[in-house]
Image (cartoon, rainbow, N blue to C red):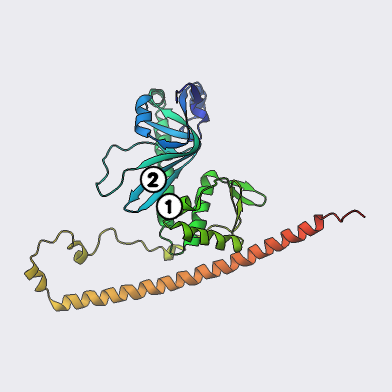
Amino acid sequence: MAANERVSLLELKVELARFLRRDERSELAGISLPVVAIDEGQLELGNLLATHNAFGATVLDGLVMNMLGIGEHAGIQLLGPGDLLIPGDEPFPTWLGGIESRTAGSVRLGLFGVELLAAAVRWPRIVHGLYACIGDQLQRLTAQLVICQLPRVDDRVLAMLWLMSESWGQVTPSGVRLPLALTHETLGALVGAARPTVTLALRKLTEEGAIVHQDAGWLLLEPPPEPAPPTAKVLPPVLAPISERGLWAQTQTQAEAQAHDQSLVYAELRETVRQLREQHRFGREQTREQLARVRTARVYMSAIRKRIEEDALKRRVPPSS
């Protein structure tokens, strides 16, 4: 695990120099970072960085999985080429399991140490690039959080495959190729579903022609879910209503709580019923829109499959007599 290899700062897949001027880029060409190669297994990031006097790292090749467990459930954050590995200093709550990092196969990491700090002093826009890369990574993590809230597991799986293809996919004439041979259990941890449920979802997506399983990953054929129209994006309030916040910071005694005016309670119930009706109407409209998009996608994929079959028949060579 010795850092004998080095990589130029301009050759990193993480775009730290994206905001530099052309003349600054030419000056930066001589700056390089140490590289370490790690075999498959558990990754002790803190010990690795301390050994090489580094404060962070970036993935050059391979995949790193950050796993966090709550009770019997586990979630995964998948990090690939171009992503950053930066350890946190704050201790986790006792009811949370600690983050465990593992490598899926061999991994090469570029280390952030004194070389990067010295370069940032001379070219401060590198810090701007570092913050932008962290922001991109956080946006992908936020998208994963939203995907995990989709009601249907097959929608979660398809959306997650497309999300990963944005970072590591390859556009081909047949579709978007995602060269990640992830297990069903790993996909389940990514989308918050059990392995058998993910297996059924993948089978459904395959039968519908949305995806094609390949030896080294997946071929994505059906387009990802379309964003909802602006009028349909209803964000929940940041703070709970006063009545709900009282559950966390209640200062009244039980006797005072029982003395509340019954008319206010009735008004709250009426408002709750009104909100539930609005949510039901909104959910029904969204379901209708999703069904319409699914019907359009099925017609589109049927036409593509028919065209592929016709082209294959045309290219077929008749057997020799």
Front-lying residue, 121 or 304: 304
Q: Quadrant of the N terminus?
A: top left
Classed neighbour count for the residue bearing mark 1: other residues with Cα under 10 Å, few (<14), some (14–19), many (≥20): many
Q: What residue is at 59 percent from the left and 67 percent from the top?
A: 296
Q: Nearer the viewer, residue 132 or 69?
A: 69
Question: How far, Cα to Cα, is label 2 from label 1?
Answer: 9 Å
In the image, is 33 to the left or to the right of 69? right
Residue 15 seen from this side: no
Residue 52 vs 164, above or below: the answer is above
Residue 189's disc is: 1
Does the CB distance between marks 2 and 1 fall below 8 Å? yes
Q: Which sits in the foreground, 162 or 229?
A: 162
Quadrant in the rendering for residue 223: bottom right
Mark 2 secondary-structure assignment: strand
Q: Position of residue 25 (x, y in %)?
A: 50, 27
Residue at numbered disc 2: 67
As shown in the figure, which amino acid type bears the numbered disc 2?
Answer: Met
